[in-house]
Image: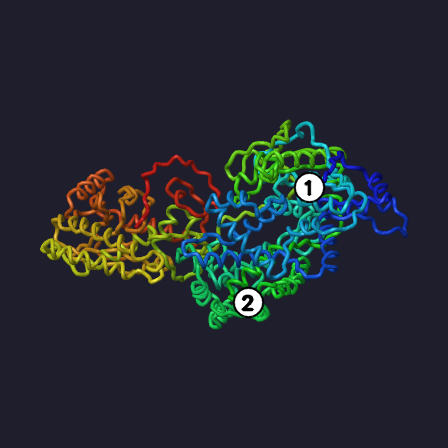
Amino acid sequence: MTISAVSPLPDIASISNALGDGITVITATQRLARHLINETAQYRSPVSRFPNILSLDAWVRQVWRQNAETADTSRRLLVGSEVDALWREVISKYESQNSAFSLLQPEAAAALAARCRSALKEYCIPMASEQVRAAFNSESDTACFLRWLDRVDIRLKQEGWVLPEDIPELIAKEAAEKLHEVWFLSEEAPAPSIERALSSRFLVTRWVHSEAIERGVSTTAFSTREVEIAAAANWGLRQHESGTNSAIILADYQRDRPLLEHELRALFGSSDQVFTDLPVNFSRGIELAKVPMFRDALLLLRLMVQDLSRSDVTALLRSPFFGWPDSDQNDKGGTIAYLFNSKRRLFELRHVLEALGKVAPSGAMNSALSKARVDRLSSVRLPASEWREQVLSLLQTAGWPSASGLDSVEYQQLELVDGVFDEIEANSLDTEPYSLALFLTRFRSVLSEKLFQPKTDVGRLQVMALGDTTGLSFDAVRLVGATSESLPANPGSLSFIPWQICRAHKISKLTEEAHYLLASRLIGQLSVSGKVSCTYHRVADGTPKLPSRLCYVDTEGETPAQTDSQESAGTPLEWIDEPAGLTTRLPNQQSGGVSLLEQQASCPLKAHLSHKLGIRPLEDEADGLTSGERGGVLHEALKHLFTSLTSSDQIKAINAVAGAERIEKAADDAVRGLKASVRERVGLPALDLERQRLKTILAAWLEVEKSRDTDFTIELKETPLEWGCEGLSLSLKVDRVDLLSTGQRIVIDYKSSAAQAVTDWSLSPVKSPQLPCYSQVIANVETIAIGQVSVTEPGYLTLGADIGFRDADKKSKKAMDRTGITGLADLKEQWLTDLTALVRAFVGGSVTPTPSPSSCRYCHYTAICRAHVASDWDAGEESTDE
């Protein structure tokens, strides 16, 4: 049994002559087989029989069907979804029978096991050999795979099933009359199992391949992947306009196709309703599981059996394929914001239903998910046919596949739905009812196996993976993404096969040199018929990249600045002069008054976006309490503490034991006051830590209050206030007000640190308007103060009369002396003027950004403002406000 290797690939005339001599031509790809059938038509008479040209997969299955028809016993060939289900079932049963064994990713293990069995069959590795089995039993992972493999083979024999990788072996064992000669056209040598199958059916087998390219390909370097893809799209447009038969070859097809298609559609003007008008042919379709319509349906079903991540739940709620109420409200955004406000990382069905019930209770998605919960779909077991009815009914209730109409491509996708469910129902392994989780696994497996390719007209510009170009020729080729890690492709992992077995049986798909030789042959074939050039990018996701060793870099590509300027030069821009944003209708009640004033003083644009337009960032996920939550619970603890200690006399009279009891109760009450959703998210250990933190801080702060030598009564604690100015009513909340025996008052605002300076209040315009605003609402304010409530440096920062805290009083007096004021009375009129100016600017729609280190550091609106501010700010200038 020998196969002779021949190069280079024959031309069309030679292939046509070989067919006339009775030679069979088998190709590595279906695409090459179709191409040869079309090209050899010019050499055939109209009445000649169909040429004997088949792809390898088609030939193998044809011979298998012929043998099966004459066999004494019937055997069934499993399709891809059934193969996947078989491996999952075997692994799941093994896991349940071995308590000491557990898999973190059973789906990935099943896929890897299937690939390893396929490789064992391809390379004819004798699994019955004691030596081979000893090698597998030498390590725990490979020994476990061997047990799975034995169980799969036993099940196949019992049921009379055949897997695709078994067919070449069965063909080789079957006695048959041999044909004269076959040409196998492939850049990769046939695997031993294929070699045996061909030799069992043909007297002469010739493996025909191309010559490897002798030197590196001329390569252009680009700064980033995005710039490189944009340049490739422009190249493709130029080739199309010139009528050249050309191809863009993507070294990493799955990664780069979406971005390239986006760029091509933008250049060719084929988006939305003219989606199929793109005059470009893509060599590979998209897995149905990744098509948005089916991807979103999977997300909806997944939500019933497992938690969804933030990105998944956002994709589900933003999907255009589900129904939402017709209203002026942003129900999708509101639902997402409601979920994200919980700061969870993962969301259960009950969390999503809670959010939908609050924001869009009449929506189709809420109806569908509520019905699924009532029907307990996550726990019932049904046969495949009933799951089909249940799932389709559920999707229909949710408004799937569209509440707003489908485009032509989406209609093509929708036509595949019945076939997907038919294949699930036909699964030979499912003889008993099963759970929704298992049905979802079957559904995803079938969708992943099926590829969707939009029906478009044949064009002269092709987008292909390098492996799809076998035997094809083009006038011009551009190979994109030719980095060292993508060209040649990295060898796949077969970690369930011992390395000594791989080496002894020369499993070439695991070696980098085999992949390099394959890539060099493919490029060599392309360079024979046309001009081939390569491009690569120097940086991707912040990581430096090197060119492939198949390339030599001789040109620098356009920089992003050049590309942007060229694109913008041909785009007419409309300039709109808007000196002001939306004005406020008066009178008006405005919540968040303190935040509004602070932001208006810091940056008017920020106040306008946040308080007038309601644009706010989504909350980040958090495992423990956030800084804002810790600040809130600290405020509550202080409120509880000074509810029981209401005067300086009580504070000074309390002993250590009683003080500790009051502190502990205040900390407990504050933690118990947290929302149930917050307590559920952070857990008891985090809450216990927070109690300890609060007790430590409260004890330190109580000592500060005891050290004050002025008598006072705590008059207000966490009290809401209203301040009206120029027709705008602002809602405020004061942390604490102390009443002195003289009838004067001290307004206190708690902070985790004294981030402000006295000059923020004493200079005009006022930079920190919070406490000055309180002084306009509360009568007889003699002193404003920041209470720095912390363990390390507890104390006060004040402006005004003495509060009985020596250090703060000294600093306050020095500050007033420097500015030439004797008390707050000298500042109140100026404060009112400054505060009124802030309110007028907000009401009038002022949106002028005022970038500065303090205003930009914690700003979430950089995408809108785009102010470029130096980043070398003093790290200690500001701290998070608790």
Q: Which mark is residue 754?
A: none
Counting from the top left corner in percent of width and height, residue 600 is at: 39, 49
* Figure check: 749 above or below 365: above
Q: Is residue 825 visible?
A: no
Residue type pointed to by label 1: Pro
Secondary element at tag 2 = loop
**Is the Cβ of the residue at disc 2 closer than 8 Å to that at disc 1?**
no
Cα distance, mark 2 to mark 1? 50 Å
Residue at 40% in and 62% down: 587
Quadrant into which the N terminus falls: top right
Residue matched to label 2? 398
Q: Alpha-carbon neighbours of circle 2 within 10 Å: few (<14), some, or many (≥20)?
A: many
Task: Please tell me which residue is depicted at 51% across the width and 50% down the height of the picture.
Answer: 145
Tell me which amino acid carries mark 2.
Ala
Q: Front-most of 501 and 769?
A: 501
Q: How many marks?
A: 2
634 sits to left or right of 121:
left
Q: Secondary structure at mark 1?
A: loop
User: In the rendered view, does 613 fall on the left or right side of 246?
Assistant: left
Closer to viewer: mark 2 or mark 1: 1
Give the quarter of the image for residue 238: top right
In the image shown, does 764 or 739 lie closer to the viewer?
Answer: 739
Considering only vertical position in the picture, is 813 above or below 278? above
Question: Which residue is outermost to the front?
Answer: 130
The front one of 448 and 671 is 448
Q: Tell me the residue that label 1 is attached to.
A: 190
